[in-house]
Amino acid sequence: MRFAVLATLTLGSLLASASPPPTRVERGAPQSNIHHISPPFPPGFKPVLPPPVGRKPVSPSKLPTPTVRLDLASVEGTYDGHTHSYLGIPYAQAPVGHLRFSAPVANSPYTGKINATAFGNICYNFVSPQPPFPTWITPEQLQFLEVFDTPAPAPSSEDCLNINVITPTSAKPGSRLPVVAYIFFGAFEFGGAFDVDGRNMVKRSVELGEPVIFVSMNHRLGPLGWLGGKEIKDVKQETSVSRIREALRWIQRYIIQFGGDPTKVTLLGLSSGGVSAALQTVYNNGNTEGLFHALWAESGAIQPVGWIDAPQPQAAYNTYVASVGCSDAKDTLLCLRQAPVDAVTNVNALTSVWTPHADGSVISDLPQTLLTEGHVAKIPVVAGNAEDEGTLFALNIPDITNDMEFIELVMEAYFRNISSADAETLLQMYPNDPAQGAPYGTGDDFQYTLMHKRFASFAGDTGVDAVRRFFTQQMSAHSNVWAYYYKRFYVPGFGSTHASELPDMYQSGNLQDIFIHFANTLDPNGATNVTQNWPKYDTSNPVLLEFTRNTTPSLTNDTYREAAIEFLIEMGQKMPWPI
Ligand SMILES: *[C@@H]1O[C@H](CO)[C@@H](O)[C@H](O)[C@H]1NC(C)=O
Ligand SMILES: *[C@@H]1O[C@H](CO)[C@@H](O)[C@H](O)[C@H]1NC(C)=O
Ligand SMILES: *[C@@H]1O[C@H](CO)[C@@H](O)[C@H](O)[C@H]1NC(C)=O
Ligand SMILES: *[C@@H]1O[C@H](CO)[C@@H](O)[C@H](O)[C@H]1NC(C)=O
């Protein structure tokens, strides 16, 4: 194990980030998957889900080389028979030397010939140790977990602020096609812009006659992306929320050259990517700077988090400084900037998780407060979540046996300072009854440990469902909002868990078709072969489009576990998560 972290902290990290369990460690060489999953498939076993949605290599051939002009440079991409890909273009100065732990700086004008035929370096991944998979895990569940295990296509490096652009082959300067700005998932700690294959969406968009350009950007992770502390607060725009912003500025400057329309940019993200995308709506108190025009957030939105210099992130800063060997420095940040890259990436004393916070500059107040006070971009939004989000987060919970231990876990993960009255309410809202737990609607089945389904229900509702419901409730006061509920792909024991819509969105499916239509028209209604009308979300009539195993989506009311989730929303408002 690279990182000596208590399993309990890993748990907190997973829950707080509303993110899946990392299953691999990427450092240095590509494809160094320490935790690569090789499930023992029985003969004739049919996977429940398609294979991972990562990009397949283009076999070398004599296909023509697509080229775009950026500034004085000629950028060479690849052609796979359906799309053009321009990969690994730097969008900001390398964040090295004095730019380490600094605000992003725009790229210098491009000159010469730029080889954009392969992915650029990925940012360093920081993955907490994964406890062994529980003994009850099934081949189907292992198969599903592979969606988080796309091998990295390039080495990791600090010099990783690069962007990928995938276009229809017909796109050329002046085409003005809608642009999808995709922000990758991975708990703010792992993964990269390669984690889904954007070519599927571009190819499909052409088939639908609604062509889009797919852009994905790498940004820094773990302490290099999300370090807290007053020292970091003093460096304005230091976190990756600003690096993502810088990538959006790059899109404004350059996307027209690829055939994109800089006035039609839709943010898209799942899990921590959805959180990051949603944070852009409260960045600069909701001033979009004209950089984006719509948002589609999957299982991640504005989370109730605290200040960057609160005791928790400050302690994380101090511990990080010590682990790099900078505790005695007069200027600890300068010491961090001057430390060898191995020292700042080989973190063996994580004490906290690395996630977004209020920073007093670009995120001027608690994000949840900015949202409730209306300091938010008034743009069309689609936000949704899956039915059984929390089954993934409960994968490795300790074996809790009574109410007291349950509340201890609740406090550790989310509500550090819960009052005894609120704890009582919580125990009633989430009773120790497997039939009411997650995966939902499965009676007493899949209760892997004594309180497994109870905790899965609580964790999914707190980390994702309440966050989504709060976001759609608040945003619908300002702009057009549509919300969905995803219960299509189903893995026994997991149900329709966190990220289960990945194949439907990023390989093929009417979820993807609806998204493409939304990126084109800013309205998810009217997509090809989808007849169900999708009404706008309204707090007096909160409707969800429900994706069931049936190919035709239908409507349902957003009132499931209404009192419990409302209680969780209130808890989040009065008590930011301890991250
Ligand atoms: C571009 O980069 C790729 C990947 O590094 C390499 O295989 C290829 O030879 C390069 N092409 C040119 C023209 O340099
Ligand atoms: C915990 O809650 C109590 C009562 O509301 C409050 O006085 C105390 O300051 C809180 N402690 C922390 C660490 O937030
Ligand atoms: C729409 O549905 C019809 C009937 O199932 C099918 O033939 C057609 O290919 C679909 N269109 C698209 C663009 O998928
Ligand atoms: C939603 O609730 C309203 C009022 O309770 C009810 O009239 C309507 O039929 C419900 N809609 C759906 C799709 O269940």
Image: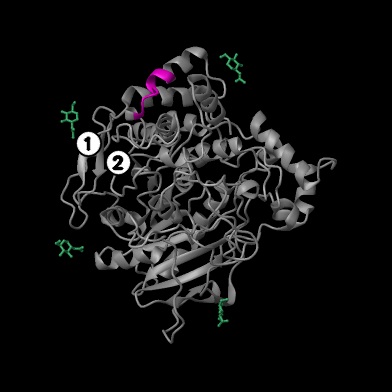
Q: Give above or below for 248 relative to 400.
A: below
How many numbered discs? 2
Kindly tell me whether mark 2's CB lies below 8 Å from ligand 4: no
Residue 159, numbered label: none
The residue lying at 48 percent from left, 35 percent from top is: 303
Q: Secondary structure at mark 1?
A: strand
According to the picture, the residue beneath numbered tag 2 turns out to be: 485
| Image quadrant in which you'd find residue 264 | bottom left
In the image, ligand 1 is in what quadrant? bottom right
For the residues labelled 1 and 2, the Cα–Cα distance comes to 9 Å
Residue 415 percent location from the top left of the image:
53, 25
Nearer to us in this view, 323 or 162: 323
Residue 32 percent location from the top left of the image:
60, 62
Query: For residue 432: magenta?
Result: yes
According to the picture, the residue beneath numbered tag 1 turns out to be: 556
Viewport quadrant of the C terminus:
top right
Range of residues picked out in magenta: 427-434
The residue lying at 57 percent from left, 60 percent from top is: 33
Query: Which residue is at the far top?
Result: 421
Residue 359 in sight: no
